Amino acid sequence: MVRARPDGKKAKAGAGATGLPGLSTRDDPRLGEIVVDRNGMTVYRFMKDEAWPKPVSACTGACLEKWPIVAPVEPNDTEGVVKKDLMTFTRPDGAEQQTVDCWPVYTFAGDKKPGDTNGQGVGGTWYAVSPDGKPVGAPKK
């Protein structure tokens, strides 16, 4: 049996229940091409985090209840995401977290189904992630 992804394309071997790789992209009608996890859920960046040379997450404690971390993904288990600077790091609590362009990434508990982007722009600090790791729609500094 051949599984199909939510976008109708053939599922990758070893892909999750949705047929998606660990990280991939989808075209959002409002935001353009954005990164999603293996469940098709939108992936976000927190503007208070730090990237290179060492990723640092400013989302700790209760923040993680609303913004769960994206677990590590093998680079060969991605599709459409820029692999350069795709890495993981160990958080102070010992959990491993995925990065895109060295920036820690998260999902949003307020997104209930694949395709939701309810976390976009929350607090002026949370933004969907483009395939190259940039925050989609974030104000220019």
Image: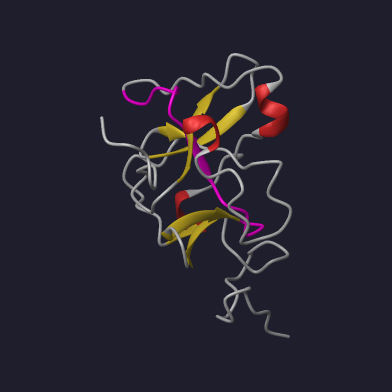
Task: Please check the rendered image and state whether residue 130 is part of the magenta-colored stretch, yes or no.
Answer: no
**Could you tell me residue 23's position as x and y percent?**
52, 54
**Could you tell me residue 77's position as x and y percent?**
52, 57
Most common secondary structure along the magenta stretch: loop
Q: In this view, does 49 lie above or below 26?
A: above
Q: The C terminus is located in which quarter?
A: top left
Q: In this view, does 27 lie above or below 105?
A: below
Q: The N terminus is located in which quarter?
A: bottom right
Seen at 66% across and 35% down, the residue is 68
Q: Is residue 42 left or right of residue 28?
A: right
Seen at 57% across and 80% down, the residue is 10
Q: Is residue 32 above or below residue 64?
A: below
**Could you tell me residue 6's position as x and y percent?**
63, 73
Front residue of this view, candidates 99 and 6:
6
Instruction: Give the residue furthest to the top.
Output: 92
Q: How is the image coloured?
A: secondary structure
Q: What span is colored magenta in the figure?
A: 38-52
Q: In this view, does 88 lie to the left or right of 137?
A: right
Seen at 73% across and 64% down, the residue is 17
Q: In this view, does 55 lie above or below 116?
A: above
Seen at 66% across and 60% down, the residue is 114
The answer to which image quadrant residue 87 occupies is top left
Front residue of this view, candidates 38 and 43:
43
